[in-house]
Image: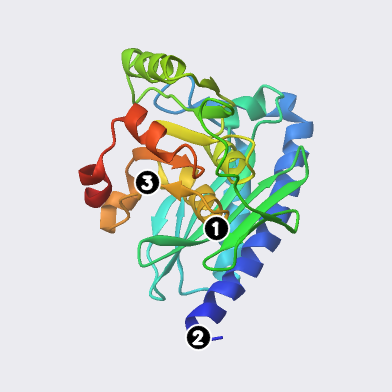
């Protein structure tokens, strides 16, 4: 094992520990969600609570203690640069709307990025006690069991996840749905992009597409999907682009071409990302 592999392994182990601890705190808040003060961000559907902030602070503190020279990007408090070449990219509670509404479709998402590529991905789903985990070259697991995608699953014999938010027009979302249904597929939307990416890695969904997402929503899931044998559209992660939104698309082997076509993504788009 070389130094780089050891560095990734150590961060992967810490990411799993932190995700479980963060999930416990988040679930405690979920159990008493009626007492939370809910705030909105730029859109009434985009909400945040003290639970999001406390969970992110917990993760930041644990990362700072374990790897003080690493960078850190969290949804709630933004980017702090580092000097190690590694950056943690975190969504403390992805799916806050389902969270505050009492639905189980939310998760803690943690990724570690090196050379603009997610090399560690951990997603913990407290309501189902499911830990999705992967690191570069080491495969993906769900609660310790290896994940491997079935190439026979397509958009026509399995479900596709889609996402939408105020950054995209209703017409563009309608076209995605229409094109997917027209191609013989069907879809679900759970309210958490990170969770649906985890479901792609587990083979529960054959793919996931959202025209605009942030790195903290997708990097953990991207690593897990790739290590399970799937494909994902590269996310622009150079400099300030890491903090901006971009299209997100991930798919199992049997759905890549169909979903690229539905998303209107060609080879040039992939090369430019």
Judged left or right of residue 128, residue 149 is left
Q: Residue at x 38, y 37 (%)?
A: 257
Residue picked out by circle 1: 227
- Residue 156: which disc? none
Q: Find the distance from the CA under tag 1 to the CA under tag 3.
A: 14 Å
Give the CA distance from mark 1 to mark 2.
21 Å
* Circles 1, 2 touching at the beta carbon (< 8 Å): no
Toward the viewer: 246 or 199?
Answer: 199
Q: Which mark is residue 233?
A: 3
Taking depth in this image into account, of 22 and 189 the one nearest to the observer is: 189
The picture places residue 217, in percent across and down from the top left corner, at 48, 42
User: In this orientation, which residue lies closer to the viewer: 63 or 135?
Assistant: 135
**Secondary structure under badge 3?**
loop
Q: Which residue is mark 2?
A: 3
- Near mark 2 (Cα within 10 A), the count class, few <14, some 14-19 or many ≥20, is few
| Disc 1 secondary structure class | helix
Q: Earlier in the sequence, mark 3 or mark 2?
A: 2
Residue 204 found in image quarter: top right
Q: CA distance from mark 3 to mark 2?
A: 28 Å
Q: Is residue 188 shown above or below 170?
A: below
Q: From the viewer's perspective, tell me whether residue 241 is left or right of residue 184.
A: left
Instruction: Indicate left or right for 141 with 216 as reference.
Output: right
Question: Image quadrant for the N terminus?
Answer: bottom right
* Element at label 2: helix
Q: Residue furthest front?
A: 152
Number of marks: 3
């Amino acid at each position: 094992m070389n130094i780089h592999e050891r560095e990734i392994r150590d961060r992967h182990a810490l990411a799993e520990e932190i995700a479980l601890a963060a999930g416990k705190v988040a679930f405690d808040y979920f159990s008493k969600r009626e007492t939370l003060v809910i705030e909105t961000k730029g859109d009434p559907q985009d909400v945040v609570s003290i639970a999001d902030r406390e969970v992110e602070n917990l993760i930041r503190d644990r990362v700072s203690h374990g790897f003080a020279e690493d960078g850190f990007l969290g949804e709630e408090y933004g980017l702090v640069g580092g000097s190690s070449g590694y950056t943690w990219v975190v969504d403390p509670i992805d799916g806050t709307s389902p969270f505050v509404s009492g639905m189980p479709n939310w998760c803690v998402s943690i990724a570690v990025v090196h050379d603009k590529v997610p090399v560690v991905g951990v997603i913990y789903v407290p309501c189902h006690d499911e830990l999705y985990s992967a690191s570069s070259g080491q495969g993906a697991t769900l609660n310790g069991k290896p994940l491997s995608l079935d190439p026979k699953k397509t958009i026509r014999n399995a479900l596709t996840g889609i996402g939408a938010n105020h950054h995209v027009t209703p017409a563009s979302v309608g076209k995605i749905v229409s094109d997917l249904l027209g191609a013989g597929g069907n879809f679900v939307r759970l309210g958490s992009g990170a969770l649906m990416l985890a479901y792609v890695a587990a083979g529960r969904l054959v793919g996931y597409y959202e025209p605009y997402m942030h790195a903290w929503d997708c990097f953990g899931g991207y690593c897990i999907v790739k290590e399970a044998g799937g494909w994902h559209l590269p996310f622009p992660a150079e400099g300030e682009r890491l903090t901006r939104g971009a299209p997100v698309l991930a798919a199992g082997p049997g759905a890549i071409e169909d979903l690229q076509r539905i998303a209107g993504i060609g080879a040039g788009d992939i090369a430019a990302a």
